[in-house]
Image (cartoon, rainbow, N blue to C red):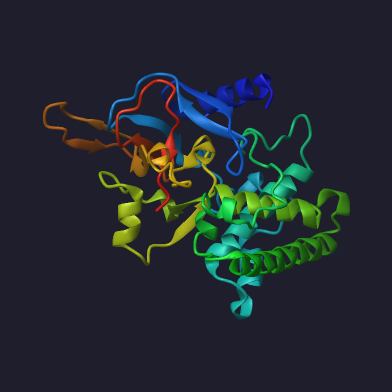
Amino acid sequence: MKPVDIEKFCAYCAKVGIVSKKLSFRPSSLPWGPISVFVDEPVVYGSPIVVVPYQTVLNCQTMRGNRVPHSLPTFYKMFQFLTRRGRMDSTTAQSLWLASFLATYHQNKSPSNSLAPWLSFGLQTDLSFFFTPEHAAFCPFLKEARNDESLRDLERLATFHVRLAHTMIQFHGRRKGIPSASQPTFDQLNLAYRTVIKRALPLPVNCEPSAPAELAELMEATPDMPILPSLIPVVDLIRPAVSVGNDSASMEANCAIFTCVESDFESPATRRLIIFETTPFSSRKVAVIATKNLKKNDEVLLGIE
């Protein structure tokens, strides 16, 4: 991306309350690419690397009201259609609505109505060859695929799901008299869905706090907890920590995700937590915390297990 894009993105992050250590966004090789996140200062174990207000996260709970383009069906209507007769599970339907939001918003963007900064820059890259073993290593959605045949099965299923979502968008447009130029094409929706599959992370409904435990520990302890596929600004640019070949040490996770509420400590000695929460969501945060000491110029690597 051009430097000016990074500057605008960072300015937006500061405006909406996203705080972080000194970070830089550098070109990254495929299959993760095109951007990875690095620290430009030492980070001590236990320190927050980036903290994101829940209201800036993109998912079917936060994107509502006047944030939803008129040419996109409401989440409830699309969810009911997609899950009818067991067509798909709720998480897949939520991911498809989020992808539909991205594609529809992108189709209708103008100089005064741009999807960026809501979507971190540089995410929608060429994913035409997405269902491959190389991408599977970085994508939780594809990790269960054991071989090329199972990846092809997942690709066919994903294409079928996208066609269902695209059919719903077209039907909504005909009923509302919306010009086809305001609706995403199948290819745009397909790209957006692959972006969601690759970059979205699961968050609990209402950003249920996990602190002092990691979010992964909360989800493991409560397997029936409702989750929402979510695109989290800045966090969606962090490369997942996976082993590639024999170079496992270089891909070891150095941070973890926590969900929490805005808070203050009564005493640095006792660390007794006092919570100040005013309105729903306004104080909920997604925090990426260092799980080891990081040196300057280290890449931030997030565990996805």
Residue at figure coordinates x 35%, y 43% from the top left: 258
Residue at image coords 55%, 70%: 89
Measuring from the top left, give residue 125's x and y in whole percent. 69, 42
Residue reaching furthest front? 246
Quadrant in which residue 43 is drawn: top left
Q: Residue at x 57, y 60 (%)?
A: 94
- Direction bottom: furthest residue: 85
Location of residue 13 with respect to 256 vertically, above or below: above
* Residue 69 visible in the current orientation: no
258, above or below 216, in the image = above
Which of these two is toward me, 246 or 117? 246
Residue 84 drawn at (x, y percent):
62, 76
In the shown orientation, is residue 229 left or right of residue 291? right
Q: Is residue 66 left or right of residue 187?
A: left
Residue 220 lies, with reference to residue 234, above or below; the image says below
Whether residue 262 appears in this view of the structure is: yes
Looking at the figure, which quarter contains the N terminus?
top right
In percent of width and height, residue 252 lies at 38, 41
Total tally of numbered discs in the picture: 0
- Above or below, 290 relative to 170: above
